[in-house]
Amino acid sequence: MGVPATGGNRKKVATLVALCRIAERDYHINGIAGWLETPLHSNALITGLGMISVNRYDLVLRLIGNTLRSVAMRCAPDDRVGALT
C-alpha cells in the first residue's frame, strides 16, 4: 500500500477533475485526456498537461475557449451559433 495522499496532492487532483468537468460541460470536449496530451502548436512540444504541471490551469481554459472560437469563426455564419454553444 502507498502513502496516504497529502492535502496538497488532494487539491491538485480536485483541480484537475474540475478542469476536466469544465472542459466537458462548458466546452463540450469529449476525450479531454487526449486533448491535454496533444502539442499545443506544431513548433512547440508543450501540451495542456505541461501547462497543468506548472499550475497554469487558467491558460489551459483560455486556450480551450480560444480554440473553439477560432473553429467557430471558420464555420458558415448560420453554423456559428451552434458551434459556440
Image (spheres, helix red, strand yellow):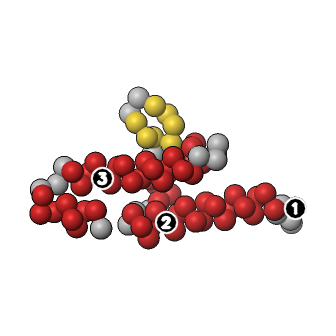
Callout 2, which amino acid? Ile
SS for dot 2:
helix
Q: Is residue 41 left or right of residue 74?
A: right
Q: CA distance from mark 3 to mark 1?
A: 43 Å
Earlier along the polypeptide chain: callout 2 or callout 1?
1
Image location (x, y in percent) of residue 52 = 60, 48
State which quarter of the image contains the N terminus. bottom right
Mark 1 nearby-residue class (10 Å; few <14, some 14–19, many ≥20): few
Image location (x, y in percent) of residue 79 = 16, 63
* Residue that label 1 marks: 3
Figure label count:
3
**Any mark on residue 69, and which?**
3
Image location (x, y in percent) of residue 27 = 39, 63
User: Which residue: 50% across, 57% down?
Assistant: 33
Q: Is residue 67 visible?
A: yes
CB atoms of marks 2 and 3 within 8 Å? no
Callout 1, which amino acid? Val
Q: CA distance from mark 2 to mark 1?
A: 30 Å
Front in this rendered view, residue 11 or 31: 11
SS for dot 3:
helix
Q: Nearer the viewer, mark 2 or mark 1?
A: 2
Q: Is residue 10 above or below residue 56?
A: below
Instruction: Name, please, the residue furthest toward the top.
Output: 43
Q: Is residue 6 left or right of residue 84?
A: right
* Residue that label 2 marks: 22
